[in-house]
Image: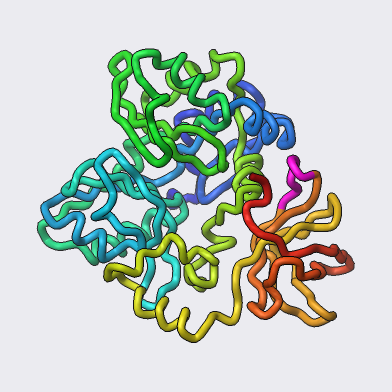
Amino acid sequence: MSVNKKLDRTPLYKNHKKIDAKLAPFAGWEMPEMYGNILKEHLHTRSANSIFDICHMGEFIIEGKKAEKDLENLLSCGLASLGSGRCRYGFLLNDEGFFIDDLIIFKYSCTRFMIVVNSSRITNDAEWICSHLSTSTSFTNISDKTAKIDLQGPLSFKTASSVFPDIEFVVMNRFAFIEFEYEGIKLTASTTGYTGELGFEFFMPPESAVTIWELLLEVDSVKPAGLSSRNSLRLEKGLPLYGYDITDKITPIEANLERFVNFNKDFIGKDALIRQIRNKPARILTPFLCAGRSTAREGFTIYKDNKPAGVVTSGVFSPMLNKGIGLAMIDQSISAVGTIIECRKDDTKINAVIIDLPFIR
């Protein structure tokens, strides 16, 4: 964010204004919250495909002979088993095992990687990574030189193939990426996303974002969607959000994300996580389903037997389930599936039950 605290704008700002998108502050950016109706955007993404302006995200390039070794030390996920042209979800942790950020790592080769990080953590991540790299490993922040548009939904492969007919997207597995050119525009397409649907994340130079955005919108089945529907989509699939479900006061063990930690290698924070597993965490991030349409949102207190037992970290109305859903950091002792809880805030009381993730399959 600039010194005068003006919100940054993505290259697609004028496109959003043309179609009367509702814009709202997010992590220092003026971002499209919705284009008219969150419910319709959510359901359209689940049934067809939508595009999202995600140009606010951060991207780093890590290069050098010791790049892989340095990143193995920094990240919770393993890289040695990751092939070129593949990507993986993982975490940056501090010495105490707390989250610095969650991210996606892209492996071009053993000597060249790209990391995609949360927009609110770009500065923190860059400082932490640079302070732990070998002198021979280079770090380049390409966030200002990179735009990102996400195409998400069950028709996304069909759409991508029609827009870029020379590219064989259908042979791509999940968490893979390719580089290609379209009319002189250099693009990277990865089969990743934050909706739980099939889809792509397209990376390109900022000056090409409008061209690609408008090109995708020419397909009849494609509609724009905002950050509000992206939030409800990700929560239906149980995907955590930094700053809410995971923070610098929470570990992957407490966040119930141990499956994304490779304990067969050394990394910063590993010893702290092992100690926490041995001692068993007192709290755990747990999904809950509300009894009806009423939704327990962030900040609601969880009660069990009329005693406070946790707090809601994320909560939304699920268009697919027609009920409120959420994640809560609660006492480990009441986290068993089937446990009945009550969510309270001021005079509002909402009954809920602990369930397994994801909310929809």
Q: Is residue 205 visible?
A: no
At horizontal 37% and vertical 72% (from top left) the residue drawn is 94
Q: Which x, y percent locates residue 309?
A: 72, 78
Q: Which x, y percent locates residue 30?
A: 55, 41
At horizontal 57% and vertical 31% (from top left) the residue drawn is 153
Q: Which x, y percent locates residue 117?
A: 40, 51
Query: Most extreme residue toward the bottom, as rendered?
Result: 279
Q: Is residue 144 part of the magenta span, yes or no?
A: no
Q: Which residues are magenta?
A: 316-321
Instruction: Indicate how the structure is coloured in the image.
Output: rainbow
Taking 81 as reference, is 11 left or right? right
At horizontal 31% and vertical 58% (from top left) the residue drawn is 78
215 w.r.t. 260: above or below: above
At horizontal 59% and vertical 61% (from top left) the residue drawn is 244
Q: How many marks?
A: 0
162 w.r.t. 9: above or below: above
Which image quarter: residue 36? Answer: top right
| Residue in front for this viewpoint, 4 or 216 | 216
Q: Which x, y percent locates residue 361?
A: 64, 45
Which image quarter: residue 41? Answer: top right
Taking 34 as reference, is 349 left or right? right
Q: Is residue 133 visible?
A: yes
| Residue in front for this viewpoint, 57 or 334 | 334
Taking 136 as reference, is 175 left or right? right
Taking 69 as reference, is 167 left or right? right
Query: Most extreme residue toward the right, as rendered?
Result: 347
237 w.r.t. 178: above or below: below
